[in-house]
Amino acid sequence: MNKYLLSFIVGLFVAQGCATAAITVKKASSVAKKETSVQNVGGSLLPTALTLYQTVQQLNQQQQELSAECEPSTQEVNWVNKMIKEWAKSGGVLPKGDKIGGMAKCNKDDNSYSKSIQNNIEYEEDICYEVFDDKSDEGMIWQDYPKVTTATYYIVDGEYSATGKRAKDKRVASNIYDIFNLIDFTTEDYTAEDAKMVAKLNEKMEKCAPAKLSAKKAAMWGDFVMGAVGSIGQNTNTGSLMETVSGLISSGGGMSGALQSLGGVATSLLDK
């Protein structure tokens, strides 16, 4: 776990503990007094905060990870790269700003698709895509067009590992579906053999494209947050708490957004 983020989370609850004296518990005269200490609230929220951080990391890994049925074969990668070149020769136009599926072009000097996957998992940085810029591509019409790349990485005990070797820790990511989606050829533009590959990739893209994985991530966020809310307890300002939960889900699950929302949850818990 990032030690700075952990320090921030722990500090949040220490600060709350120090503020005990500033809290006054109000009650109606006809109702028995029921006190809720900051320490009790913090004690129930801290495990949830830590679990939330771990879940953010896990979901981030899963968003990039392709299941065995979604992993592209070498044949599929080579075929899409060949079609990108054909698409370039036919005048294929790249999206404005050269953004593809939310990815920008990699800086060749200090980055690659594989490195950006690592940075995304560890630090939530953006993923980039590589282009045809080898010596053999110089002067060709497809130079600087996007290239399909596959990255192999390892997750050991829930964390990215630069030295992982075990097969069970191996993960695979690829931008093949984002790049394949750029090609706007019609069925008439393909040979009978190519049409078979198109059909195969379209079928895989239907369940493996990043948009599908993002939807799955959003659903998992919803399940997790509702479970976390249920585990904290019922003596809360429900309207305020659910407003915070909604903001957390729509934020996309970034750690910074999660920490801000946790501050709102803590306030909600003390709002009797």
Image: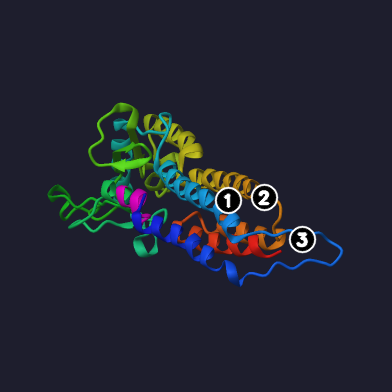
Compare residues 214 and 180 and report the one nearer the observer: 214
Identity of the residue furthest to the top in this view:
167
Residue at label 2?
233
In space, the residues marked 3 and 1 are separated at their CA atoms by 21 Å
Residue 2 placement, left or right of 256: left
136 up-or-down from 193: above or below? below
Residue range corresponding to the magenta coloring: 118-126
Q: Residue at x 50, y 37 (%)?
A: 207
Residue at label 1?
44
Residue 82 in picture, x, y percent from top left = 28, 41
Type of amino acid at the residue the image marks with label 3: Lys
Residue 214 in picture, x, y percent from top left = 50, 47
Residue 170 placement, left or right of 220: left
In space, the residues marked 3 and 2 are separated at their CA atoms by 18 Å
Type of amino acid at the residue the image marks with label 2: Gly
Residue 269 placement, left or right of 209: right
Marks 2 and 1 in Cβ contact (< 8 Å): yes
In space, the residues marked 2 and 1 are separated at their CA atoms by 9 Å
Type of amino acid at the residue the image marks with label 1: Ser
